[in-house]
Image: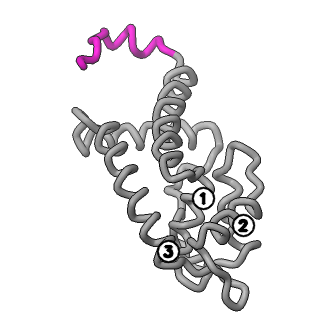
Amino acid sequence: MTVQDYTVEELTAQPIGYWSGATMRQVVGRIRAELAVEHLTQPHWWSLNHIAGAPGSWGRARLTDRLAPFDDQDTDFETVYGDLIARGWLTEESGTFVLTEAGEAGRLRTKERLAKVHERVLDGISPQQYAATLNVLRRMIDNLGGDSDLPRTYARPDVRH
């Protein structure tokens, strides 16, 4: 597919709210569709990755506190944890979550699916263009008083990157 060319004037007259929203809906929609293949939601995925990234570090309250700011669907994280435990992907030991072999296998399958989504999103976009796009969006966030730092998505709970 070829993207239609427009002049700089035409493009700079476009509302960023529309284009950032349209992009978000397309990207997140595709991510959610791929997660659904494994009967997962984004909060399931975030949970699995945090637990895998810092084994023995995440209890219910701490993980919920970390993930809730990313959630746009008012997720009941207790339900997410209960589902992952019921399907045998997580256990709890001494108040922290542990990923099981089945959970790691599911996480890796899903990671492969999402890597393909990422590749498709970046088709025809150089690493430099992608980085420049993120920096422009980060500048807009900063201009409006938001947090433009990169998220600490899978970091240990006690370490700032």
User: Residue 122 occupies which quadrant of the picture?
Assistant: top left
Number of numbered discs overlaid on the protein picture: 3
* Residue type indicated by callout 2: Gly
Q: Position of residue 45 (x, y in %)?
A: 54, 58
Q: Say whether residue 76 is left or right of residue 91.
A: right
Q: Which residue is mark 1?
A: 44
Residue in the picture at 40% in, 50% down: 114
Secondary structure predominantly adopted by residues drawn in magenta: loop
User: Residue 84 occupies which quadrant of the picture?
Assistant: bottom right
Residue in the picture at 58% in, 81% down: 98
Image vertical order of residue 153 relative to residue 73, above or below? below
Q: Earlier in the sequence, mark 3 or mark 1?
A: 1
Of the numbered discs in the image, which one, if any, rests on residue 52?
3
Of the numbered discs in the image, which one, if any, rests on residue 145?
none
Mark 2–mark 1 Cα distance, whole angstroms, equals 10 Å
Please check the rendered image and state whether residue 62 is part of the magenta-colored stretch, yes or no. Answer: no
Label 1 element class: helix
Q: Position of residue 119 (x, y in %)?
A: 29, 43
Label 3, residues with CA under 10 Å away: few <14, some 14-19, many ≥20: many
Q: Which residue is mark 2?
A: 82
Label 3 element class: helix
Question: What is the span of residues highlighted in magenta in the rendered image?
Answer: 1-14
Q: Position of residue 51 (x, y in %)?
A: 56, 74
* Residue type indicated by callout 3: Ala
* Residue type indicated by callout 1: His
Which image quarter is the N terminus in? top left
